[in-house]
Image: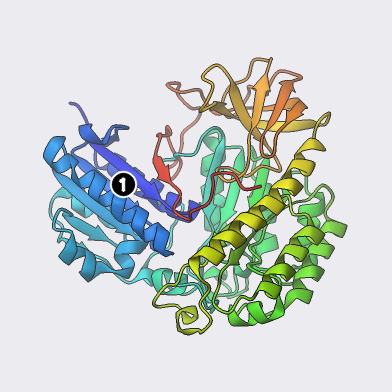
Amino acid sequence: MNARKVHFVSLGCPKNRVDSEVMLGVARAAGYAHVDDAADAEVIVVNTCGFIGEAKKESIDAIFEMAQHKESGSCKRLVVAGCLSQRHPEELAREMPEVDHFLGSSDMLKLGQVLAGDAERMLVGNPAEWLIQAGDPRTLSTPGGSAYVKIAEGCNRTCSFCVIPDLRGAQRSRPVADVVREVEQLAAAGVREINLISQDTIAYGRDAAGRGQGGERATLAELVQKVADVQGVRWVRLFYLYPETMTDDLVELLAGHPRVVPYVDMPLQHAADAMLRRMRRGHGGDRLRRVVSTLRERVPDLTFRTAFIVGHPGETDAEFEELCEFVRWAEFERVGVFRYSDEETSRSHALEGKVPARTAAARYRRLMALQRRIAHKKSAAMIGRELEVLVEGTSDEHEYVLMGRHAGQAPDIDGQVYLSGGEVRPGEMCRVRITQASDYDLVGEVLDEAEHEGAAAPPGAREPGAVAPAAAKRRVALRVLQTDGRERQQN
């Protein structure tokens, strides 16, 4: 009996991608097979992003694009899920009669009701009611031997420009044991790189949900240590660290643990004191300089990724110049720049001194040009180095060229290492000598055979061992759309 067919479109951040992978797992458990062509699918699911204006527009465009398949394709049911439907459920339901079902940002498991055929149209619930667990179904979509692991949901910060607490609820941390169980399942399925994500990773364990049975508070350092100790894991990477004082235990793991990569993703947002106050970040520029200096001094070979917002209400020319000077001083390896989005439910929306869109765009271009020069210098310095590389698969641009990433390159947002020579497969780790460099990407020669034992199976092969439901039996090529207006790589 042939499986029924489903097609997914996932928009937004890696956290949203994990939610899409859970819904993929739900669909698979219900007897549905994922298809790459939406025209062939009986059910289409669009997992939306509603964080900023451009993300909302791209989500709406994707919904209308998929809705056309109800007329021209095989689609009988269109499902819209995620942050956009969480934020505007009634409006979307009124304006989009083409959509058969709406799920919110924490309603991933309700897709099972939809596929069973006995669900109401509006299924948007309380965003604080769900937290992913190791036993939830999940099908991976990330390439090679990499996976994201969501360690918490929601956020307790009150940044003036951000609406995430409204969309995702308060901070809810997963117990350490449950995260470790999921990582063990992923490692058994061939995953070598674990990317720990949440909205506010540095705050992991501070809420009651993250505490153990005895009420003791879990810490991020404790979690990272236990994840890194899982057999088969080679890289553990941290995303979305808030810029506050990091514990000595966590810094020591970044500095010296052989499987915790010296990579810090820490969105700083700005550097001028007055701007940081308007953004309600809870600190000034001096703290940022201390945090950057401490990490540079204590973590050898550190890769520092950050993000900034330009054009926020009240940003003056002098404050933007202060931000540029901060970037020159810090010489970050990776930088993402966002143009401020004036969200009606954010505190920033009520602020005076709105920056014209043309001015914000000019500041965006200037800051990115500044960072590009820094990135080029950093990349050129890699020539001649020997690095461990995780092989991801065939290049999108050259079908006969394999590509991968070294420890200083995070999936999806950083550059690639294009490989020459050697016999390697996706999911394997190999040693590479870097021979060429561009602003973002590197070219390297494979020096030795990859570690075939325990590597992720090539497409079509059976993966080793019995794998629990949360770990993927095979990956799918999920259609993922970034919705923040950035270029794909902004090192």
With 427 as the anchor, is 124 left or right in this view?
left
Q: Looking at this view, is 351 or 264 the one in front?
A: 351
With respect to residue 55, does 385 lie above or below?
A: above
Q: Looking at this view, is 194 or 355 the one in front?
A: 355
Q: Residue 326: x, y in percent?
A: 76, 65
Q: Report helix, strand or loop for mark 1.
A: helix
* Residue lying at the far right of the rendered structure: 297
The answer to whether residue 4 is seen in the rendering is no
Quadrant of the frame with the N terminus: top left
Q: Residues within 10 Å of mark 1 (few under 14, many from 20)?
A: many
Q: Residue 50: x, y in percent?
A: 38, 63
Amino acid type at circle 1 is: Val
Image quadrant assignment for residue 443: top right
Q: Residue 39: x, y in percent?
A: 22, 34
Q: Looking at this view, is 103 or 209 the one in front?
A: 103
The image's colour scheme reads: rainbow
Q: Residue at x 62, y 31 (%)?
A: 404
Q: Determine which residue is flagged by label 1.
A: 26
With 302 as the anchor, is 358 left or right in this view?
left
With respect to residue 107, does 183 lie above or below?
A: above
